[in-house]
Amino acid sequence: DAGVTQSPTHLIKTRGQQVTLRCSPKSGHDTVSWYQQALGQGPQFIFQYYEEEERQRGNFPDRFSGHQFPNYSSELNVNALLLGDSALYLCASSLSRSYPNQPQHFGDGTRLSIL
Amino acid sequence: DAKTTQPNSMESNEEEPVHLPCNHSTISGTDYIHWYRQLPSQGPEYVIHGLTSNVNNRMASLAIAEDRKSSTLILHRATLRDAAVYYCILINGQGGSEKLVFGKGTKLTVNP
């Protein structure tokens, strides 16, 4: 049973470009959350998708947007990249109806570097 | 979001028990206490969670104070693979959201 998979594992972009990161949730999970983790810090919540809708959003600008597909997979899009967007981007999946008694499962992230 | 306080770092020797503390003095009656850990170059990994009673699983034990204002994650015999950053997180059982609010966690070093 595959866990959460993210692609790509590493990505290098330049300032002003746009990027799309992808996430496939653990089998049977219907909720996907995205987190940004700067070096030496804990992950910070970006937003969460459930039933193809953004259910909750953290303190991130509109440059960060997402999408959830009918098969529950998800994308994170970041426009007009800034140097400060360099970070590890983590995807986590869970089963909504089991909240909060079941854990979130994380992928190993996409390392995004902005030059 | 309810906040937690953890020591920045702790050190242990291999095969010895480790007690990782977490203070959450503003915890509400419906907050669950969750622990995650993050090994180097990996995403966070669920360890254990509880509400009021102490909990055991194959990875660890969770001891919750009677007033619920603190808790302790116990690794019974630390191995080198347990070297990680450990996060104590409160999740509101009535909030309907699964947002995890991570602090800086405790970096555990395990000496051979």
Image (spheres, rainbow, N blue to C red):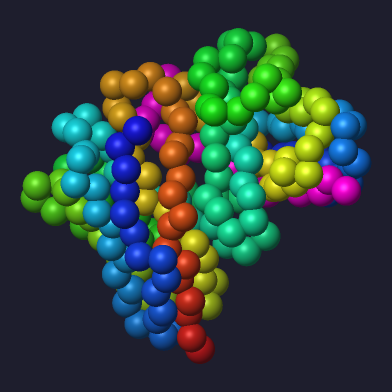
**Count of numbered circles on the image:** 0
Observer able to see residue B73? no
Camera-nearest residue between A21 and A86: A86
**Residue at the spot x=59%, y=59% of the render?**
A40
**Residue at the spot x=69%, y=47% of the render?**
A88
- Residue B53: within the magenta? no
Camera-nearest residue between A54 and B18: A54
Seen in the picture, residue A72 relative to A44 is either above or below; the reply is above
Please state the extent of the stretch shown in magenta in the rendering: A97-115
Q: Position of residue A71 (x, y in %)?
A: 70, 17
Q: Position of residue B69 (x, y in %)?
A: 17, 48
Observer able to see residue A48? yes
Camera-nearest residue between A94 and B93: B93
Q: Position of residue B53 (x, y in %)?
A: 17, 46
Camera-nearest residue between B43 and B58: B43
**Residue at the spot x=69%, y=41% of the render?**
A89
- Left or right: B104 in relation to B5: right
- Left or right: A89 in relation to A48: right
- Left or right: A65 in relation to B88: right
Q: Quadrant of the N terminus of chain A?
A: top right
- Residue A101: within the magenta? yes
Please identify the residue farthest to the left as the structure is shown: B66
Q: Quadrant of residue B81?
A: bottom right
Q: Position of residue A49 (x, y in %)?
A: 59, 19
**Residue at the spot x=44%, y=84% of the render?**
B14
Seen in the picture, residue B50 relative to B11 is either above or below; the reply is above
